[in-house]
Image (cartoon, rainbow, N blue to C red):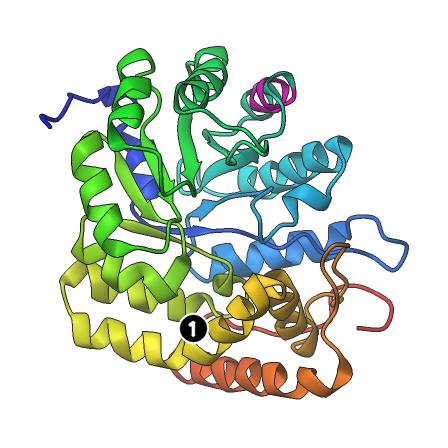
Amino acid sequence: MSTTAFDTRFDARRAALADVVAIPVTPFAADGTIDREAHAALLHRLLDGGVRTLTPNGNTGEFYALSPEERDENVELTLQQVRGRVRGSTTVLVGIGHDVPTAVAAARHARDAGADMVMVHQPVHPYVSQAGWVDYHRAVAEAVPELGVVPYLRDPLLPGARLAELAGHCPNVIGVKYAVPDAARFAGFARDAGLDRFVWVAGLAESYAPAYFSAGATGFTSGLVNVAPHLSLRMLEALRSGDHPAAMKVWERIRRFEELRAAHASADNVTVVKEALASLGLCRRDVRPPGKELPEERRAEVAAIAAEWAAGGRASGGAVSEGAVSGGDI
């Protein structure tokens, strides 16, 4: 399929997607509310560590466990921290979703709060037609033509032609978070949709990034980055330079951690990240149902991995500073 020229107004935002796209956790206080102090400290840790693209309300941020008010708060807290930085140095890509009116309202809130882009979570509905998928994303994109729009794609049956159709209506659809665990399918989908028309973000994080970069991805999402920013950035540097052996050395180092997250159909995806952060004294380990904290006997392995990464980060000059930032037991 021939590629379509893209809107140059979004060049800076396209560049921000060709990077480590961090999905920050949402830390909770002892009373179950968002822990604002920990939230700020964790974001500063990411930004000080070299992260430039943040996605509040992603899955690692427990998007589906947050109330609408909490999702708005997450966005506002994130942008408060970003405003103190050099203008243009950090890009905020807000996760939105649910029904069309809710998604549109969230996109407009993100725009009004000062965000740069929105990532549209996959439609949560038992019956999703391909034409309806286009209509859903078109409704969001047309409501916020000033923002870049990034569909989060997890459906292996959606053909690339449908994404191309959406892009034909909406020039602000500039990237795709592709999270189907099949690198060959990704390669075909990207070329059917228009390889150069979109920025392709490997949506299954560091574990899949080397394979997806070989097929056309130029960025990847990360929840692990909350724990060890230096490792995520090291992998990105290796992939950008075409140094596959170096990228795979990072892959080997993060393999066990990502296996723990992926176990039991990813039931502990967020839990393991928060357990690692708790072991470093950075936030509480609390996750909301349907997530569950790790049982006591499984915590030591996660803590050992986090401690080893922290020591390695300090040795290499990475930003892995530790310290308690919220009250209460962690």
280 horizontally vs 107: left or right:
right
Disc 1 packing (10 Å; few <14; some 14–19; many ≥20): many
Mark 1 sits on what residue? 318
Look at 48% across and 70% down and name the residue there: 228
Question: Residue 267 at what x, y percent from top left?
Answer: 62, 63
* Residue 178 part of the magenta segment: no
**x, y percent for residue 105:** 63, 18
Q: Is residue 149 above or below residue 95?
A: above
Magenta span main SS: helix
For residue 3, say whether it is visible.
yes
The N terminus - image quarter: top left
Q: Is residue 162 above or below residue 45?
A: above
Q: Nearer the viewer, residue 242 or 138?
A: 138
Q: Which residues are magenta?
A: 102-107
Q: Is residue 263 above or below residue 53?
A: below
Residue found at the very far front of the displayed protein: 127
* Residue located 47% across and 71% down the image: 258
Q: Would residue 195 be visible to someone looking at this image?
A: no
Is 169 in front, or is 28? 169
Query: Which residue lies at the image location 29% right of the left edge and 45% below the top edge?
Result: 18
Instruction: State the image coordinates of residue 124 (x, y, percent, origin top left).
Output: 59, 34
The picture quadrant where one finds residue 74 is top right
Q: Decide if residue 241 is on the left or right side of residue 78.
A: left
Count of labels in the image: 1
Element carrying mark 1: loop
Residue at 71% in and 59% down = 291
In the rendered image of this protein, does residue 20 appear above or below residue 302? Answer: above
Q: Position of residue 248 (x, y in %)?
A: 26, 75
Q: Point out the residue furthest to the left here.
A: 2
Which residue occupies the foreground of this view, 194 or 106? 194
**Circle 1: residue type:** Gly
Q: Which quarter of the image is occupied by the C terminus? A: bottom right
